[in-house]
């Protein structure tokens, strides 16, 4: 072997080894300084001799690659969710179901912590990490390999005797003390603190610049191997071996011989979980024997051989300072409890939702009450009780407001509903801004560059009072506003222009017609095809559409009876928004067989758009950047050298326009 390459490889191996000792074993064998020096040497050598590039080099830990959009990848094995249990009874039922299936009453179980983070699926080939994909919807996830490579508890190269081909699943987490440190720094910088470790970890995986991801204190616990190898017999065996291959396996797992032992494991960690430096939301119990696992298989949602035991949600006490009221875009008024800040599940909580008047009365809330709060699945916690012994009877009972906190009009409450409404739809400021904020939101028009605060600011400055006004904004209107620089103004205009491509069904949803959510908007768009057609429909026409009832139909008819709404819609239409369904771009045939193409360079006789259309109409796909998922690079003149290097490395065929045209010829 080339001496130079030998030297580079040796440095790489050393750095992999020391990285493992430091981050996985927590037992460094050399000083940080020596480690940094070796890393620096390697970075320099790799820079000087790019021909020895290695996709798994320890230098990738520092990041530096930019991912514009994360390719979505279908999982080879779906990433199922877990069935839940909450008591010994539930576990016994589960055990009975298993017994009925396999008839062994001497089952062993492997108990593990249920790490509360973001799950990830890693693919290793010949001992090298080649792909990392998020769970997504369980069927398809996002390829976040470049960011994952920066996580030092994930081995890029394995050691020992590992299977040549396998996948392993784990959970990316941020430890509690790292999370607190991150937030301290943010607060010092005048930034809002992050909400909780799990969401922050999840956001970190989607950072476009992997050197930013490298700065986040992400860690990973691995817990499940997916492989067709026959050698490993049990989950316990798998975990022990995976540890030897260099994976970070938590030592908290335990092999149990019966459900009583499982229960003691559960109770042990219920007591001790607060001492862990990371969050868990329960325990996972798995049938230890892999053959039994295979026999039991999966339901449509869960593995039958595994179950989660969920701990009761954490509760804390704090003081209720006051109740304030928010008015939403529909005029619905929601009470919010303001609390003395308190730590709950790793997050500082200062507000809790109260839903409505009935809820306040049911809890019989008084100012200064010591309230019991808990966090369910949702981000905002709720008040579940009051400590009556600590009540100060001089404090006032909370009484629901009678007037809108914003426009002061009397609120109304329908007998049949629990919600109060401000009916001043046209002139109540939070309703006006709420509608525009809904219009620009991600699931609606997704206008980049505009956020809720900017909408408030534009409204307060008298620049907008409905959605159509956004498109009439001028540069000179925006530049004098606070925090508006040239760049942010550019972004707003680009975002507005881009929004004109948003399909009709989303425009319909964006209008914020009461009861017309995403699904209803889609159904209506498909049924009536265009706004002009929909506008003329009566309740009896609308009601014929599947799943559209009288409440929705009335609301739609009401919306179009309002002159101001109609005027706004006419303006939006003349501005170029999509007000009808575009016919589907169905492929003419499947000559390209679903293959994916990246187009690069300049072509003499074809524009890019033409090529894209040709690919799509013949059943191919377009990708924006080259990855291992790319089947062909369609190259013209002047292809960028980095693209050429990349296809060479990934062994992706580069085809010219003539070969491409040939692919489109129907073969006899
Ligand atoms: P759930 O999303 O509540 O249905 O729970 C399933 C998720 O639990 C999986 O997708 C994993 O991300 C996560 N999980 C955490 N720890 C473990 C573990 N030790 N074994 C299996 N899954 C786990
Ligand atoms: Zn109002």
Image: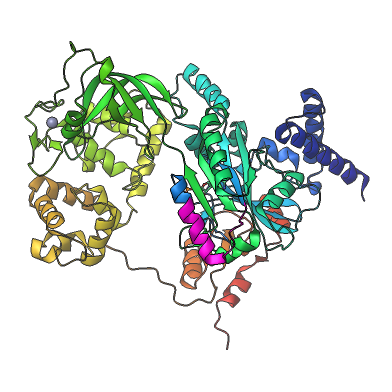
Q: Residue at x 25, y 28 (%)?
A: 336
Question: Which of the 4 image quadrants contains residue 528?
Answer: bottom left
- Image coordinates of residue 417 in percent, x first then y, are 13, 42
Magenta-drawn segment: 92-108
In the displayed structure image, the side of residue 202 where residue 458 appears, left or right: left
Magenta stretch: includes residue 104: yes
Marker count (numbered): 0
Give the dominant element type of the magenta stretch: helix, strand or loop: helix
- Image coordinates of residue 227 in percent, x first then y, are 67, 60
Question: Which of the 4 image quadrants contains residue 102?
Answer: bottom right
In the displayed structure image, the side of residue 559 where residue 583 appears, left or right: right
In the displayed structure image, the side of residue 554 where residue 267 appears, left or right: right
Residue 344 visible, this orientation: yes
Magenta stretch: includes residue 530: no
- Image coordinates of residue 166 in percent, x first then y, are 68, 57
Seen from the viewer's position, the closer of residues 610 and 530 is 530
Seen from the viewer's position, the closer of residues 131 and 646 is 131
Q: Residue at x 72, y 48 (%)?
A: 242
Q: Residue at x 9, y 32 (%)?
A: 411
**Picture layout, residue 506 above or below residue 564:** below
- In this view, the residue farthest toward the top is 394
**Picture layout, residue 97 above or below residue 467:** below
| Quarter of the image that includes the C terminus | bottom right
- In this view, the residue farthest toward the bottom is 668
Question: Which of the 4 image quadrants contains residue 564?
Answer: top left
Q: Residue at x 35, y 40 (%)?
A: 493
**Picture layout, residue 38 above or below residue 549:** above
- Image coordinates of residue 577 in percent, x first then y, are 27, 52
**Picture layout, residue 474 above or below residue 614:** above
């Amino acid at each position: 072997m080339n001496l130079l390459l030998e030297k580079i490889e040796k440095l790489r191996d050393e750095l992999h080894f020391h990285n493992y000792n430091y981050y996985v074993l927590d037992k460094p064998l050399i000083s940080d300084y020596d480690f940094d020096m070796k890393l620096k040497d390697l970075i320099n050598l790799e820079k000087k001799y790019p021909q020895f590039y290695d996709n798994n080099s320890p230098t990738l830990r520092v990041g530096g690659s930019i991912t514009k959009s994360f390719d979505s990848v279908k999982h080879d094995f779906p990433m199922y969710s877990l069935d839940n249990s909450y008591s010994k009874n539930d576990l016994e039922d589960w055990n009975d179901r298993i017994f009925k299936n396999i008839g062994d009453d001497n089952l062993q179980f492997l108990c593990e912590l249920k790490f509360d983070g973001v799950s990830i699926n890693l693919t290793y080939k010949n001992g090298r990490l080649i792909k990392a994909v998020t769970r997504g919807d369980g069927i398809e996830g996002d390829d976040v390999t470049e960011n994952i490579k920066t996580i030092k508890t994930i081995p890029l190269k394995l050691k020992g005797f590992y299977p040549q081909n396998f996948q392993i699943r784990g959970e990316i987490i941020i430890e509690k003390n790292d999370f607190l440190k991150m937030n301290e720094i943010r607060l010092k910088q005048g930034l809002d603190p992050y909400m909780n470790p799990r969401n922050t970890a999840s956001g970190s995986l989607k950072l476009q610049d992997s050197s930013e991801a490298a700065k986040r204190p992400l860690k990973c616990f691995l817990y499940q191997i997916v492989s067709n190898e026959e050698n490993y017999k049990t989950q316990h065996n798998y975990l022990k071996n995976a540890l030897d291959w260099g994976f970070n396996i938590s030592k908290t797992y335990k092999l149990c011989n019966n459900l009583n032992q499982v229960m003691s494991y559960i109770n042990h960690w219920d007591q001790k979980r607060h001492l862990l430096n990371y969050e868990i939301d329960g325990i996972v119990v798995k049938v230890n024997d892999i053959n039994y696992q295979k026999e039991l298989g999966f339901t449509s949602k869960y593995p039958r051989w595994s179950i989660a035991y969920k701990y009761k949600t954490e509760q804390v006490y704090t003081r209720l300072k006051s109740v304030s009221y928010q008015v939403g875009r529909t005029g619905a008024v929601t009470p919010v409890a303001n609390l003395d800040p308190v730590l709950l599940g790793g997050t500082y909580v200062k507000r809790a939702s109260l839903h409505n008047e009935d809820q306040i009365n049911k809890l019989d809330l008084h100012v200064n009450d010591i309230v019991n709060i808990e966090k369910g699945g949702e981000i905002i916690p709720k008040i579940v009780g009051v400590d009556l012994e600590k009540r100060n009877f001089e404090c006032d009972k909370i009484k629901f407001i009678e007037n809108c906190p914003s426009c002061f009009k009397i609120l109304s409450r329908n007998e049949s509903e629990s919600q109060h409404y401000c009916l001043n739809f046209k002139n109540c400021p939070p309703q006006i801004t709420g509608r525009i904020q809904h219009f620009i939101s991600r699931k609606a028009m997704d206008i980049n560059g505009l956020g809720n605060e900017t909408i408030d600011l534009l409204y307060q400055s008298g620049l907008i009072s409905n959605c159509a006004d956004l498109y009439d904004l001028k540069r000179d209107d925006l530049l004098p506003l606070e925090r508006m620089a040239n760049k942010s103004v550019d972004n707003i205009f680009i975002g507005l222009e881009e929004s004109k491509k948003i399909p009709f069904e989303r425009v319909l949803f964006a209008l914020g017609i009461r009861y017309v959510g995403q699904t209803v908007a889609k159904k209506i768009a498909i049924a009536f095809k265009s706004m002009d057609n929909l506008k003329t429909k009566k309740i009896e026409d609308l009601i014929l559409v599947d799943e559209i009832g009288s409440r929705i139909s009335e609301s739609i008819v009401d919306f179009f009876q309002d002159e101001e709404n109609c005027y706004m819609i006419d303006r939006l239409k003349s501005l170029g928004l999509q007000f009808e369904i575009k016919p589907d771009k169905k492929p003419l045939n499947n000559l390209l067989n679903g293959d994916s193409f990246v187009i690069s360079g300049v072509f003499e006789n074809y524009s890019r758009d033409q090529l894209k259309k040709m690919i799509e109409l013949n059943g191919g796909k377009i990708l924006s950047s080259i990855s291992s998922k790319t089947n062909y690079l369609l190259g013209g003149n002047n292809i960028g050298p980095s693209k050429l290097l990349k296809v060479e490395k990934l062994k992706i065929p580069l085809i010219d326009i003539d070969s491409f045209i040939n692919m489109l010829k129907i073969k006899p």
